[in-house]
Amino acid sequence: MLRAVLFDAFGTLLDARGLHLEATKHILVDLGLSHLDADEVHERWDEELLALEPQATAGLSTWDVFKRSLRACLAKYGVLLGPEELDIAIEVLEETIRKRTKPFHGALKLPAFCRELGLKVGLISNADGELLRSILRQTGLEKLMDVVIISDEVRIAKPDRRIFLMALEALGVRPDEAMMVGDWRPDVIGAKEVGLACALVLWGREPSFLLDLPRELMPDIMVERLLDLRGPILSLCLGQGRKGLKRGT
C-alpha cells in the first residue's frame, strides 16, 4: 500500500522551460560573443551536459557541471573561457532561473492532495541547494514537503540509488510503499532500481529518451499532466497495486 510520494523538482513541479536558452542569449552578450547563434550554442551546451557521464561529475556541484559543459561547448567555437568568465555565465543562468521559474499547473495541488490522503511527501532533486530552496519558499512548495533531498547538499545525484534511499529513510517508508514522480531518465532509472513505483510526467514531450531502457526500468505509468496522477495515486492508496496502473499517456 502506498505511504509516500516523492517528486522531482525542475521539469516535474517547476517549469523552467526556455530559461536555459534565454540565459544563453544573455551570456553570449555579456561575454562579447553575440556573433554566435544562441540557439545553436544552447543546443550544443545541452549536448555537452547530456554527454557528461555520472562518474565524471561525481562530487561536482551543479554549477561546476554547467561550467564544465559550457567551456567544452564554446571550445568548439575556438572560444576558451577563463574562471571569471565562467562565473559571469553561471551568475546569469542562476539569476534567470531564480526569477523566472514558475510552478507547473497542479504543482501545489497534487502534493496537497497526497497529504490529504495521509501520505508523506518528499522531494529529490539534482540541483543547487540555495537556489532550489529559495524557489521552493517563493512558490509555497516548501511547506508541502516532509523532506527535501538535494544533490549538492548530500553530494549524491540521481540516478544513484543512495539518494532515493536517503529520502525513504527520512520518511520512514519502504521502497514498495513509495512512488517517484519525475520527468527524466535519472528519476526513472534510480527509482526503479530501488524498487519504487514510478510515474513519468511528459508535459507534451515524446518519451523517446526511454527507448533504450530495459522493460524492468520503464516507468509504471506515463501521464501528460501532474493532476492526471490523482486517480493512480488513490488506487495505490486503496491497495490495488501497481498492476492497476496503466502504461501510456
Image (cartoon, rainbow, N blue to C red):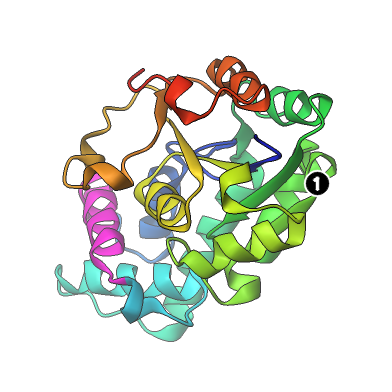
Q: For mark 1, does the 10 Å Cα neighbourhood hold few (<14), some (14 to 19), or many (20 or more) residues?
A: few
Q: Quadrant of residue 147?
A: bottom right
Q: Is residue 52 magenta?
A: yes
Magenta span: predominant SS is helix
Please state the horizontal and vertical placement of residue 72, each as a whole percent of the image: 24, 73
As rendered, which of 26 and 238 lies closer to the eye? 238
On-image quarter of the N terminus: top right
Q: Disc 1 on helix, strand or loop? A: helix
Could you tell me the amino acid type at mark 1?
Arg
> Visible in this render: residue 206?
yes
Q: Is residue 200 left or right of residue 34?
A: right
Please state the horizontal and vertical placement of residue 14, each as a whole percent of the image: 59, 38
Above or below — where is 154 with respect to 166?
A: below
Q: Residue at x 57, y 46 (%)?
A: 176
Q: Is residue 121 left or right of residue 174?
A: right
Which span is picked out in magenta?
Answer: 35-53
Please state the horizontal and vertical placement of residue 197, each as a whole percent of the image: 49, 40
Above or below — where is 154 with respect to 230?
A: below
> Visible in this render: residue 8?
no
| Residue marked by disc 1 | 137
On-image quarter of the C terminus: top left
Q: Is residue 79 left or right of residue 127?
A: left
Q: Is residue 55 left or right of residue 78?
A: right
